[in-house]
Image: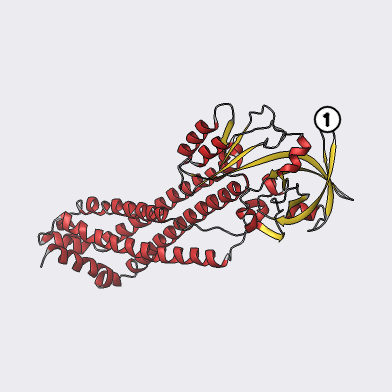
Amino acid sequence: MSSFKLIGFYANRLLRSEGIQNTTTKPVIRIAIFGIVLGIVAMLLSVMVVTGFKNEITRKVTGFVADYRISAFNNSDSFEEAPVLIDKTKIAEIKSISGVSHIQAFILKAGLLKTEEDIQGVVLKGIDKDFDNNFFQEKLIGGTIPNLHDSSSSKFVLLSENLSKKLNLKTGDSFLVFFIQEDRKVRKLTVSGIYNTGLSEEFDNLYLLCDIRLLQQINNWKNGEVGGYEVFAKNGHDEEKVFEALYKKAGYSLNTKSTKDLYPQLFNWLELQNLNVIVIIGLICLVAGITMISTLLILIMENTKEIGILKSIGANDRFIGNVFGSVALYILLKGLIIGNIIALGLAYLQLKTGIVSLPEESYYLSQVPINFTIPGILLINGIVFITGILIMMIPAKIISGINPIKVLRFD
């Protein structure tokens, strides 16, 4: 009989035959498997949820303000901007950058929104006919996005659900907006549609979308002068490379920033979640490792007599260590398989049903997001597997210290 078959025979005996009949050993093995299952489920769900959070919130932010913004340098923190005019040739060059999918002009203008009963400070975001409305079409909960293809400027605006509830406005209602500047101006606007992105603090409580020509008139700007340009990147792009290319094409006289630079507090919060996951994975690996070590120690203690007999008939420490290592490998693989099935099953259930909800005003999402990241899943399984393999080396050290003469004489 080959050594591999012998190792398998004795490992199987420990798991299913005489060794397993011991009232202590059997529940210990079950607890070890349960511990690995619980650990792998917690780690996989943590990674899928956190990456889901990061992806969904990033998609929302970039959907609202794009991945990059090109504007004039402004020393103040106000929403008042200096006009920017980029010729068509340079816009075509920006579009040709590998990783860039779309570019669109915008203007930001602060104002006071007044209804019959309320006054609210708002920021109007002017958009033109090149505006990519896919994101807002997805977030639209009533009405329509303003039509910007007419020859005259539109008086319609897209309002957030938060502001519509706060100001008691619905689709078709009109209100006044006062612009505080040297030549004070007021415009009567009409709600064409209502949106909800879930990003209350940063966007929904502040922004209205309107025709860019309306704000050009308010600012007394010429046709073609805008507040800046929003640049959208393709999926899977290299952020640094696209930014460097965009910075060079836009020129040093303009201020080019990424979304992360514009909203650092939001992305720092997301990075903090990554740190939490790393801490969770480390702690769970530690607990799972201690559980595995305890299991192996109990197995060795319960089978000390058999180890002594095997040594007395010529079995070396490496052979016996491989027997217990095989037992540990069985526990590890069974725990990994069951844990993956449970974790992926729960994640799929959440993805399809959204059964676990969240307060959107606090987490920017109405339900726990799930991202089936294959590299992340493989990484977690790899970490657990390698940790388990390293732990399997421990029995060999303990077994080498067992003296068969003393063990058999004692028995």
Which of the 4 image quarters holds residue 404? bottom left
Which of the 4 image quarters holds residue 29? bottom left
- Taking depth in this image into account, of 263 and 393 the one nearest to the observer is 263
Q: Position of residue 354 (x, y in %)?
A: 58, 64
Q: Which residue is mark 1?
A: 182
- Taking depth in this image into account, of 350 and 27 the one nearest to the observer is 350
Left or right: residue 385 compared with residue 180: left
Q: Residue at x 57, y 33 (%)?
A: 256
Height in image: 228 above or below 365?
above
Q: Secondary structure at mark 1?
A: loop
Q: Amino acid at mark 1?
A: Glu
Left or right: residue 30 compared with residue 131: left
Task: Name the image quarter holding the N terminus.
Answer: bottom left
Q: Residue at x 70, y 37 (%)?
A: 223
Q: Position of residue 35 (x, y in %)?
A: 41, 60
What colouring method underlies this structural image?
Answer: secondary structure
Left or right: residue 183 compared with residue 304: right
Q: How would you rate the neighbour count of disc 1 (Cα within 10 Å): few for under 14, some for 14-19, many for 20 or more?
A: few
